[in-house]
Amino acid sequence: MSVMSLRLPDEIADTLATLSKATGRSKSFLAVDALREYLAREAWQIEEIQKALIEADAGDFVTPEEVNAIANKWIANAR
């Protein structure tokens, strides 16, 4: 396991300490858990963007009719 040192703004350090006390988890556990979730979300987003770019480069777009159908569905659901 690697060790990393970082500077935290006081408000984040305070929140981390408060959550640590409230949950009975270590600050390290909470920080690693938060970082793990953030990295997974960012990796997913980058992967989806890369897929979309491949589709766009291939000219794989929805038709105007498909866009209108979806927009009309949202408008009908909003009413």
Image: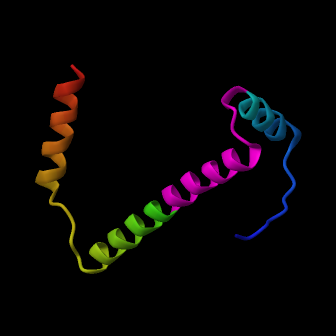
Magenta extent: 22-42
Residue lying at the far front of the rendered structure: 24
- Compared to residue 7, the image places residue 55 above or below, namely below
Q: Position of residue 21 (x, y in %)?
A: 76, 29
Judge left or right: residue 33 versus residue 48.
right
* Colour convention of the picture: rainbow
Q: Position of residue 64 (x, y in %)?
A: 16, 55
Q: Nearer the viewer, residue 8 or 52?
A: 8
Q: Position of residue 2 (x, y in %)?
A: 74, 70
Residue lying at the far top of the rendered structure: 79
> On the image, which quarter does residue 74 sit in?
top left
* Residue at the image position 17 percent from the left and 43 percent from the top: 70
Task: Please say whether residue 23 is one of the residues in the magenta stretch.
Answer: yes
* Residue at the image position 79 percent from the left and 40 percent from the top: 12
Residue lying at the far bottom of the rendered structure: 58
Q: Nearer the viewer, residue 57 or 23?
A: 23
* Residue at the image position 13 percent from the left and 52 percent from the top: 66
Task: Please say whether residue 25 is one of the residues in the magenta stretch.
Answer: yes
- Compared to residue 56, the image places residue 38 above or below, namely above
- Compared to residue 23, the image places residue 36 above or below, namely below
